[in-house]
Amino acid sequence: MEILEFLLNDDQIFTTITLVVLIALFVGNIVADKLKKYEDVDPNG
């Protein structure tokens, strides 16, 4: 688990937070994209 120790290092905490935020935004974009597609397919729309 050297990677985990590296990420939890005080010097790397900002980098870790940035990575987590970027991943969260990326996942959020994918989820929003799928929701939009479901809305477009909705026959009641």
Image: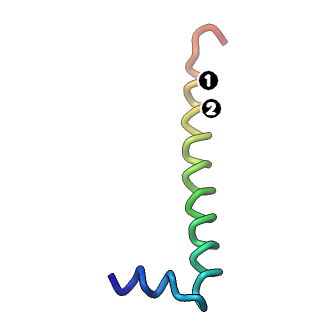
The answer to whether the residue labelled 2 contacts the one labelled 1, judged by CB atoms less than 8 Å apart, is: yes
Residue type, mark 1 in image: Asp
Secondary element at image label 2: helix
Pick whichever, 27 or 43, lies toward us.
27
> Measuring 56% from the left and 42% from the top, which residue is drawn there?
31
Percent across and percent down for residue 17 are: 62, 72
Q: Quadrant of the C terminus?
A: top right
In the image, residue 38 sits, relative to residue 34, either above or below, namely: above
Work out which residue is located at the far top of the displayed protein and give it: 44
Percent across and percent down for residue 37 are: 57, 30
Task: Answer few, some or many: residues within 10 Å of disc 1's Cα (few below 14, many 20 plus, some between 14 and 19).
Answer: few
> Measuring 54% from the left and 36% from the top, which residue is drawn there?
34
Provide the residue designation for mark 2: 36
> Measuring 58% from the left and 32% from the top, which residue is drawn there?
35
> Measuring 55% from the left and 26% from the top, which residue is drawn there?
38
Provide the residue designation for mark 1: 40
Percent across and percent down for residue 44 are: 63, 8
**Image disc number at residue 13:** none
Task: Answer few, some or many: residues within 10 Å of disc 2's Cα (few below 14, many 20 plus, some between 14 and 19).
Answer: few
In the image, residue 13 sits, relative to residue 41, either above or below, namely: below
